[in-house]
Image (spheres, grey):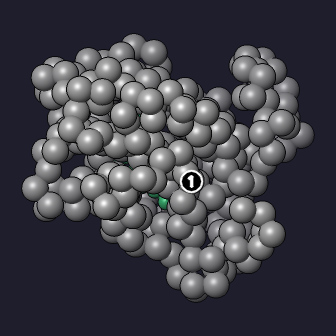
Amino acid sequence: MTIAITGSASGIGAATAAALSAAGHDIIGVDLRDAAVHADLAVPRGRAAAIEGVLERSGGVLDGAVLCAGIGPHTPDPLRLIDINYHGALAVLDGLLPALRRGESPAVVVVSSVASTQVVWAENPLSVGADRAALTTALEPAGDYAGHLAYAWSKNALTVASRQRAAEWGAAGVRLNIVAPGTVDTPLLRAGLDDPRYGDLIRGFTAPIARKAEPAEIASLIAYLLGPRAGYIHGSQFVIDGGVDAQVRPAAF
Ligand SMILES: NC(=O)c1ccc[n+]([C@@H]2O[C@H](COP(=O)([O-])OP(=O)(O)OC[C@H]3O[C@@H](n4cnc5c(N)ncnc54)[C@H](O)[C@@H]3O)[C@@H](O)[C@H]2O)c1
């Protein structure tokens, strides 16, 4: 299989690339650096370069894709976070559909977050296509924690947009699922732990399985969802968080 992976240079994306590559698949990595395709998914030109680079290297035929590139809540610029985590991921997702339609048993995994469940779609400004000015105003009350709110909005919107594609993508023969990790030991999480606003909050929250996930544990779920044994799994979000979601919201599923 030929599989494109955004965010392939680090963390979950790198672990996924390693697992799929070890299983014999051809990987086309997309990242800011250390990847086959260098592209900045924060901006439209970078997204177009990512799509073009993948199409060029795959000959226009893809069997899988993993949309993993993203930045964390500690970012100094919450709007850039929304640009990458939501708009960037969706643009690449949609841009790769024609190549995926030509693939063999094609499947896609979008990497969202358990944070997608922390806000309500009807109250998410991205649900009404809020512009930058409206987003800035809506983020103001969150003060120092605007990054976390923007992160939750971006991942909530990414999950919803992915699920909204289930009918069209299923009819096109392309399976599409979402993986929503809790805390995973990656550079993104470590940067959050080093941040004076978020460090203690992250440290203070213990999952029922009282440790962080290893990136390889997320990669193995992604690899399963891309593979033939997951042939009837489509349009679903899989939380992989050591039991946090069950602990916090046992009746919501
Ligand atoms: N680590 C966690 O605890 C955790 C939890 C839930 C969800 N996630 C999500 O998992 C995904 C991967 O995160 P990670 O923890 O492996 O982080 P990471 O920082 O280790 O890897 C993210 C990768 O995305 C790339 N990237 C960032 N901005 C980009 C841009 N503008 N254009 C192209 N590439 C860009 C980075 O260069 C990096 O290689 C993210 O979408 C993140 O939101 C992570």
Q: Residue furthest right?
A: 141
Q: Quadrant of residue 100?
A: top left
In the picture shown, does residue 128 fall above or below 181? above
* Residue density around tag 1, few if under 14, some if 14–19, many if 20 or more, within 10 Å: many
Give x and y (percent) for residue 83: 56, 28
* Amino acid type assigned to the residue bearing label 1 in the image: Gln
Question: Which residue carries the number 1 mark?
Answer: 237
**Which residue occupies the foreground of this view, 124 or 11?**
124
From this viewpoint, is residue 88 visible?
A: no
Closest to the observer: 170 or 206?
170
The quarter of the image holding the N terminus is top left
Q: Image check: 91 left or right of 130?
A: left
Q: Is mark 1 within 8 Å of ligand 1?
A: no
Percent coordinates x, y for residue 106 in the rendering:
29, 39
Residue 126, image quadrant: top right
Q: Secondary structure at mark 1?
A: strand
